[in-house]
Amino acid sequence: MWLQREIVLHAQPRGVHLITREVTRALPELEGLGVGLCHLLLQHTSASLALNENASPDVRRDLRTWLDVLAPEDFPWTHTLEGADDMPAHAKAVLTGPELTLPVSAGRLALGTWQGLYLCEHRDRGGARTLLATVQGE
């Protein structure tokens, strides 16, 4: 079975946001798979995806702080036409990446006990984000 679907994620403020439930709700066909792969591509250049701890909100806050230190707005960027948060957002997206490939097992994403999917929104007002999910399995 092959499936490809666009998932529109609602607008989020700058930060790291847990989206595991939103993604799995949009892909009910996962329940019919014994084994497979789910590839997720965020179709944007100023936001990214990550897989990390899903339990403590401190992890999400610390990741945002760390990314802001690595790519601060007050750095002497030259690409500034779209606002002070734009080029730092592109740099953060390069660090964390736009895609994840995840195993599917027994009808669900085969994540570890404490793993969750994150949307890393790097803009103050990035708007809705489009995620392209491609699922293959049997």
Image (tube, rainbow, N blue to C red):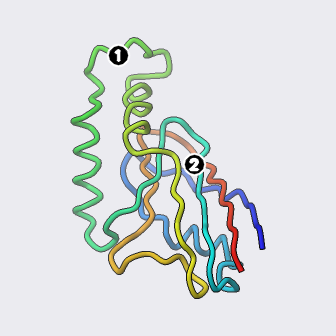
Query: Residue at coordinates 48% horizontally, 64% vertically from top-left?
Result: 19
> Is residue 65 shown above or below 56?
above
Q: Which residue is mark 1?
A: 77
**Image-based side of 67 in relation to 89, left or right:** left
Disc 2 crowd, CA 10 A, few/some/many (<14, 14-19, 20+): many
**Image-based side of 41 in relation to 54, left or right:** right
Q: Which amino acid lies under the numbered mark 2 shown in the image of this protein? A: Leu
Image quarter of residue 74: top left
> Is residue 37 shown above or below 16?
below
> Is residue 74 shown above or below 29?
above
Query: Residue at coordinates 33% horizontally, 76% vertically from top-left?
Result: 114
Q: Which residue is mark 2?
A: 42
Distance from label 2 to label 1 (Cα)?
A: 24 Å
Q: Secondary structure at mark 1?
A: loop
Which of marks 1 and 2 precedes in the sequence? Answer: 2
Image quarter of residue 97: top left
Q: Which amino acid lies under the numbered mark 1 shown in the image of this protein? A: Trp
State the image coordinates of residue 95 (x, y, percent, origin top left): 37, 39
Task: Name the image quarter holding the N terminus.
Answer: bottom right
State the image coordinates of residue 112 (x, y, percent, origin top left): 38, 77
Query: Residue at coordinates 26% horizontally, 20% vertically from top-left?
Result: 75
Q: Which mark is residue 19?
A: none
State the image coordinates of residue 39 (x, y, percent, origin top left): 60, 60
Task: Name the image quarter holding the C terminus.
Answer: bottom right
Q: Secondary structure at mark 2?
A: strand
Q: Along the line of sight, which residue is nearer the eye, 124 or 16?
A: 16
State the image coordinates of residue 25 (x, y, percent, origin top left): 62, 75
Image quarter of residue 50: bottom left
Q: Are marks 2 and 1 in contact (CB under 8 Å)?
A: no
Query: Residue at coordinates 61% horizontally, 66% vertically from top-left?
Result: 38
**Image-based side of 120 in relation to 35, left or right:** left
Disc 1 crowd, CA 10 A, few/some/many (<14, 14-19, 20+): few
